[in-house]
Image (cartoon, helix red, strand yellow):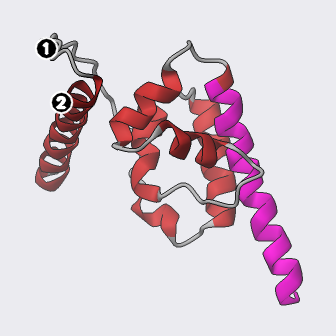
Amino acid sequence: MSEETAARDHAGAVCDYKRILQRVLDNRPSGTRQRLATALGKNRSFVSQIANPAYPVPIPAQHLETIFELCHFSQEERRAFLGAYGLAHPARLKVVPDARRQRVVRLEVPDLGDPRRNRKVDALLAEFARSIAAIVDDTN
């Protein structure tokens, strides 16, 4: 296979998994993209880029589990996404953990009256939850 053909196949696989993410996001409630951006510690424009097949920006593997959880991927959607992601980035898929049971914890925190400060608190709590998950993974 020529380098040009390989590059086209790779770009097609990237488009495939981005289309799946785009479809999932389009079927979720308003505000999901902003919640995802906050959970990832990124701007909303980052979410738009990683969900748009027209942009070649790959989705970083470390964000996949957060995306699956926050966007409530079905098992079928997750399998299809990971299949396309694996074709596009075979080496990166090794860092994606297998699906594990999750539970949702609702936490009420004070409104700080400043969107920027509220986002910082949200990101801090999301990072705290990821740190807890990492500790659990280390003990297994």
What SS does tag 1 mark? loop
What SS does tag 2 mark? helix
Quick one: label 2, few (<14), some, or many (20+) residues within 10 Å? some
Q: Position of residue 112 (x, y in %)?
A: 15, 17
Q: Quadrant of residue 101?
A: top left
Residue 94 part of the magenta segment: no
The label shown at residue 121 is 2
Q: Position of residue 50 (x, y in %)?
A: 60, 48
2 or 1: tag closer to the N-terminus:
1
Instruction: Write the residue at 22% across / 24% down.
Output: 118
Q: Quarter of the image containing the N terminus?
A: bottom right
Badge 2 amino acid: Val
Q: Dot 1 corresponds to which residue?
A: 109
Q: Quadrant of residue 90?
A: bottom right
In the rendered image, the vertical position of residue 119 relative to residue 95, given as above or below: above
Q: Are marks 2 and 1 in contact (CB under 8 Å)?
A: yes
Residue 22 part of the magenta segment: yes
| Residue furthest bottom as drawn | 2
Q: Position of residue 95 (x, y in %)?
A: 40, 62
Q: Which residues are magenta?
A: 1-25
Badge 1 amino acid: Val
Q: Is residue 101 left or right of residue 132?
A: right
